[in-house]
Amino acid sequence: MEELKPRPASSSPLTPLGFLERAATVYGDCTSIIYDTNSYTWSQTHRRCLQLASSLSSTGIKSGHVVSVLAPNIPAMYELHFAVPMAGAVLNSINTRLDARTISILLRHCESKLLFVDILSQSLALEAISLFPSNENPPLLVLIQDDYEGDGVCFTVDSRFCCTYESLVEKGDPCFKWVRPRSEWDPIVLNYTSGTTSSPKGVVHCHRAIFTIALDSLIDWEIPKQPVYLWTLPMFHANGWSFTWGMAAVGGTNICVRKFDAPVIYGLIRKHGVTHMCGAPVVLNMLSNSPEAKPLENPVKILTAGAPPPAPVLLRTESLGFVVSHGYGLTETGGLAVSCAWKREWNKFAATERARLKARQGVRTLGMTEADVVDPESGVSVKRDGSTLGEIVLRGACVMLGYLKDPKGTSKCLKEDGWFYTGDVGVIHSDGYFEIKDRSKDVIISGGENLSSVEVESVLYAHPAINEAAVVARPDEYWGETPCAFVSLKGELTRKPSENEIMEYCRAKLPHYMVPKTVVFKEELPKTSTGKIQKFVLREIARGMSSSPSTRVSRM
């Protein structure tokens, strides 16, 4: 058989863009998107994406160019996941919760050529553009308008926007021959894991990886054809864990929602017969604690990740008729690479035991070749005893190509031994299921948002009254985790700042979700013999503190 080799007919590049083309054929008259009173069919969505891709090409967008978008879960955000790469460009979805300084850094770092901006993010985008140095060209601005009339705000279009989203759609060619990847290794998306320093980590994924993770997620979560999917997970979070493309593969109905809370979610579930949704544990907590919380008429499946869901939250949520699945992934894997694969015999256990088992991250999904927990120094697998700590490592088609313009960062986690080192510390139980125990990079996961304690500490250290600072995760029943700051003050102060003053100082310099929700004053922070702050001691103190509702701030 040695003479048999790959030929063009058997080696077409894998790409998730073909999902939309197929959906237009198989599910053409079926509903693709519902947003308020507006709806589209899959044939309409396909046509609109082709028209937008055509217009992007006519404006000079070429293969390899980065096109950014700053928008919530609205139809345009969904369409851009297909239209931008259909023009050959790389899609960069930006977190709408970031501040202008951070957004400016990201746009400059990726050399974005064009930025789509939602009507509510106008001022944020314009401020970010104003921070560009005079010798650098900012991206062209396109305004996404819709019929939003919330909060009684009247919006005017700033003259700095070159056109609107709908004008690009209208003038595009519906027969446009979309740009197929020359190689399945061509980049399709760029997502930032953190944008709070001058050296952000831009994760680049190729068509092959997104194709794999999208189908892998559908199989692992057992999603049937034509589900009704409610977008409670932001699409800017790892492209909605790749379910943006996955919904096209199964001809699902995407229920888009700009802003949501528990009453909105319950209302949409009842109105549209929602079958599936995703979200961080904070969403589960919101649903289970809401006055609207009543037993569902039909089960709704929820996939949660971002932090281990507390067992009491799982119990409350599932008692209402939600069926919760738990997984683990990173921006670097494009979605969930590990899931708590449920065994039928576990249904016989008591509710508390089921919740404990479900809180574990689980085993590798089918799309991952291998997953392990290893000693980071030797690379040897740890004992399967549920207590020996090691670093979680992964390998498979879903792993990123690398970090944009960061070869050192890429080689640090994509090592020569063929593994992707996640930086997450965990254990393996005797049945082979993983469980995360800590985060070696001091990442705090609050309401599904990843934030670095180092970045918050750098702001705290700039405060004129603070001598030392350390930020750790504090368990929170609502957000999962919140940043807790331990600080010592300078001795020569005539007046000591209050906890609220420290928070306000941070609020002026950080994105809202990164602001410490608790500030603890100490005479001196605990240190090792070499002078390093002992964060594990502070974590134990934070874990022993009660979760105070007064420190919670709504971010939904």
Image (tube, grey):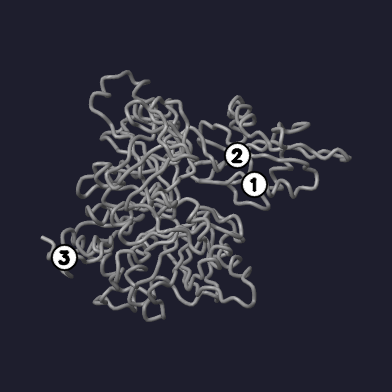
User: Do labels 2 and 3 touch, CB within 8 Å?
Assistant: no
Q: Is residue 291 above or below residue 214?
A: above
Question: Is disc 2 surrounded by few (<14), some (14 to 19) or many (20+) residues within 10 Å?
Answer: many
In the rendered image, residue 208, in percent from the top left (x then y), is placed at 30, 59
Residue at far front of view: 2
The disc placed on residue 5 is 3
Residue with the mark numbered 2:
483
Q: Quadrant of residue 326?
A: top left
Q: Residue 539 versus residue 167: which sits nearer the camera? A: 539
Q: Quadrant of residue 545?
A: top right
In the rendered image, residue 202, in percent from the top left (x then y), is placed at 49, 59
Q: Residue at x 38, y 45 (%)?
A: 394
Q: Is residue 11 above or below residue 179?
A: above
Question: Is disc 3 surrounded by few (<14), some (14 to 19) or many (20+) residues within 10 Å?
Answer: few
Marks 2 and 3: which is nearer the front?
3
Residue at far left of view: 1
First in residue order: circle 2 vs circle 3: 3
Q: Secondary structure at mark 1?
A: helix
Left or right side of 492 for 430:
left
In the rendered image, residue 207, in percent from the top left (x then y), is placed at 32, 62
Q: Amino acid at mark 1?
A: Val
Marks 3 and 1: which is nearer the front?
3
Q: Residue 223 versus residue 500: which sits nearer the camera? A: 223
Q: Amino acid at mark 3?
A: Lys
Q: Secondary structure at mark 2?
A: strand
Measure how far apart labels 3 and 1 are at the Cα level.
54 Å
Q: Secondary structure at mark 3?
A: loop
The disc placed on residue 456 is 1
